[in-house]
Amino acid sequence: MQRYGMVLGLRADKIDEYKKLHAAVWPEVLRMIRECHIQNYSIFLRKLGDGQSYLFSYFEYNGADFAADMAKMAADPTTQRWWACCMPCQEPLADRAPGEWWASMGEVFHLD
């Protein structure tokens, strides 16, 4: 099992919309996430005093080929429609790695 942490900006004018979307995630999207061996998936919101907001996601991957599973998810038409609803709410970090939307984070500490 591999743990992943990622961060992404959230547009201030889209916070309520993003929360509403995630209060009722489409069942097909949830199924695809599970089919791609992702478990224990959470997204957290942090609003700063200067008006900026950030999302932090955490999930655990228990498959054998992360790249293949992420390609499977990205190719799924329902997931693509879901992302089309979510992406206008988001602001990727300017210093993210090429090809990333959510910026990857390195694990510093873990305790089971």
Image (spheres, rainbow, N blue to C red):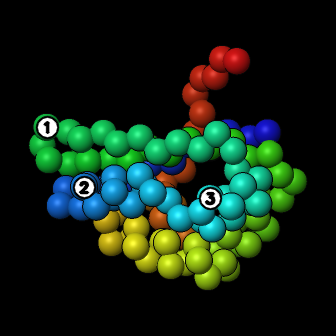
Q: Give coordinates of residue 31: x percent, y percent.
A: 68, 61
User: Which quarter of the rendered picture does the C terminus lie within?
Assistant: top right
- Mark 3 to mark 1: distance in Å? 33 Å
Mark 3 vs 1, N-terminal side: 3
Q: Earlier in the sequence, mark 1 or mark 2?
A: 2
The quarter in which the N terminus is drawn is top right
Q: At label 2, which amino acid type do we have?
A: Asp
Q: Which residue sits furthest right?
A: 64
Q: Is residue 85 visible?
A: yes
**For residue 30, which numbered disc appears in the image?**
3
Q: Compared with residue 80, is residue 57 higher up or lower down, i.e. above or below?
A: above
For the image shown, how many numbered marks are present on the structure?
A: 3
* Residue found at x 69% / y 64%: 32
Would you name the residue on which mark 2 appears? Answer: 16
Q: Residue at x 24, y 41 (%)?
A: 47
SS at badge 3: helix
Q: Is residue 77 above or below residue 50?
A: below
The crowd level at tag 1 (other Cα within 10 Å; few <14, some 14-19, many 20+) is few
Question: Label for residue 49?
Answer: 1
Residue 76: % across, % down: 66, 78
